[in-house]
Amino acid sequence: MPHRVAVAVSGGRDSVALLHATRQASAALGLEVHALHVHHGLQRAADAWQAHVGLLCEEWQISLHVGRLSGRPQPGDSIEAWARRERYAALAALAGQARASLVLLAHHRRDQAETFLLQALRGAGPAGLASMPRSAVRGGITWARPWLAMPREAIEAYVEQHGLPYVEDDSNGDLRFARNRLRLGVMPALAGAFPAAEAALAASAARSAQADAALREWTAMDLATCAGAGGELCVEPWLALSEARRAMVLRGWVRAQLGQGAPQRLLDRLTTEWPSAAASARWPAVPGWSLCSYRGSLRAVPEAHAGGRPPPPAVAPLSITCAGSVDVPAWGGVLQVFKSEARGVPLGSLHGCELRPRHGGEQFQLEASRPARSLKKAFQAAGVPEWARGGPLLWSGGRLLFVPGLGVDARALALPPDGTPRVSFEWSPSLAGTSKGSAGR
Ligand SMILES: Nc1ncnc2c1ncn2[C@@H]1O[C@H](COP(=O)(O)OP(=O)(O)OP(=O)(O)O)[C@@H](O)[C@H]1O
């Protein structure tokens, strides 16, 4: 069976040329070519674009898959950013329909040079300046830009040589869009003053991509030395790094914790304030979450806990029959259940278990050699900060099994074997709508 390749075709010059060139190469390469088109629904001309792509595909005998953007940008959303995001989501769905795992996009060298400049004008670092990758795998699809190093003039010549019909985009003249201002005003002036500007900017993008990849690897190594067992950031190893590496580690750690980048001013505040912060300082990060420092480490904490207020008094019955992640929306988190012969309770003892809030007066036994004591004292003895004490308690059959921050109660560890595997637990508050919220993390 031939490999399937999909070409994202707007109907404009570059993507029409790419579709034509891919079709020309397909027989020799054993490829089955599909075309994907997204009807933007934004411009009145969008119907004409779709019709044009439809006619081409009919003539060239290529299967066409069409999707339509249905939503509208939210107030405050940039139309360009919204359309790009939605277009990629629609293209991914169309690629699925076409059963193609490779999608070709017709970006070329001038697009890359413009992207680099736009990123620089936003003050981007190496990750942004890397601009568009030649190929990237996302959601099981390889997105490739085979013409990223191709000068636009070469594509123009190809289109002319083959007499390819394409649609002109009326919105290309709209100066409300930053890219158009750059394309119409800045790029011609740049090329006039520096004839090799486009090639040089594209080369800088490629170098930035390489620098960014190396930096990510380096930061991952630094993060490994600075993160504690629970993923917290530890101040001592962090302070031992150079200033530049500290900045990279902090940015990378915060992004991993919050599932999104943090504003630069928060990172600046943390950099100056955290090392000398009071015993338990707190910095609001994103809605619902704070970064809290306690005994030399920094953690992301849900606001309810960070503010010292109790979590919602929800009793959540659970059904745990095997190891894995149990999503508990009532508590806004995930209970990880994992096999642990040495530090676990028999799986069979979890019948009818539930997560409960603290009521006061609970007793917890930290170790077999020590007596049970009040939960509050156990927290103090184990150095669990105030804001980390509100997590749900796991009860079963009138017995307290597990407390986040403390672990499994020693009396539960002593439960006799019942033929089922022994399991232990970890509680992770989740950040709705971000990677931190994923139970499979
Ligand atoms: N509506 C669309 N449907 C399918 N693919 C699209 C669409 N718009 C853009 N693309 C893909 O994304 C690439 C870059 O988009 P961009 O907006 O820069 O191009 P364009 O000016 O609309 O058209 P072209 O690149 O074909 O001249 C296109 O070359 C094409 O591969």
Image (cartoon, grey):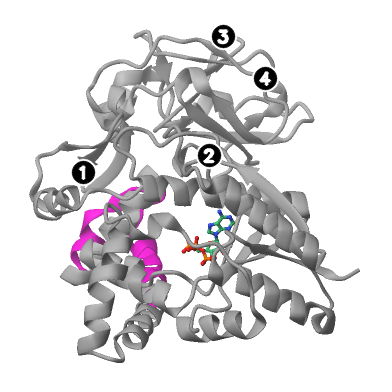
Give me the C-alpha separation between circle 1 and circle 4: 36 Å
Give x and y (percent) for residue 228.
36, 52
Magenta part of the chain: 214-241
Label 1 or label 4, whichever lies nearer to me, is 4
N-terminal label among 2 and 1: 1
Question: Is 229 inside the magenta-drawn segment?
Answer: yes
Give me the C-alpha separation between circle 3 and circle 1: 34 Å
- Give the secondary structure at mark 3: loop
Q: Mark 1 points at which residue?
A: 295
Question: Which numbered circle lies on residue 319?
Answer: 4
> Would you place residue 208 above or below residue 323 in this image?
below
Amino acid beneath label 1: Arg
**Viewer-proximal residue, 25 or 343?**
25
Give me the C-alpha separation between circle 3 and circle 2: 30 Å
N-terminal label among 3 and 2: 3
N-terminal label among 3 and 4: 4
Q: Along the horizontal axis of the image, is 257 left or right of 16?
A: left
**Which residue is painted at 30% across and 52% down in the image?**
233
- Give the secondary structure at mark 4: loop
Question: Is 67 inside the magenta-drawn segment?
Answer: no
Q: Name the residue under label 3.
A: 398
Few, some or many C-alpha atoms within 10 Å of disc 4 (few <14, some 14-19, many ≥20)? few
Amino acid beneath label 3: Gly
Few, some or many C-alpha atoms within 10 Å of disc 2 (few <14, some 14-19, many ≥20)? some
Label 3 or label 2, whichever lies nearer to me, is 2
Q: CB under 8 Å between callouts 3 and 2?
A: no
Give me the C-alpha separation between circle 2 and circle 4: 19 Å
**Which residue is painted at 34% across and 83% down in the image?**
198
N-terminal label among 3 and 1: 1
Few, some or many C-alpha atoms within 10 Å of disc 1 (few <14, some 14-19, many ≥20)? some
Q: Name the residue under label 2.
A: 438
Q: Along the horizontal axis of the image, is 415 left or right of 29?
A: left
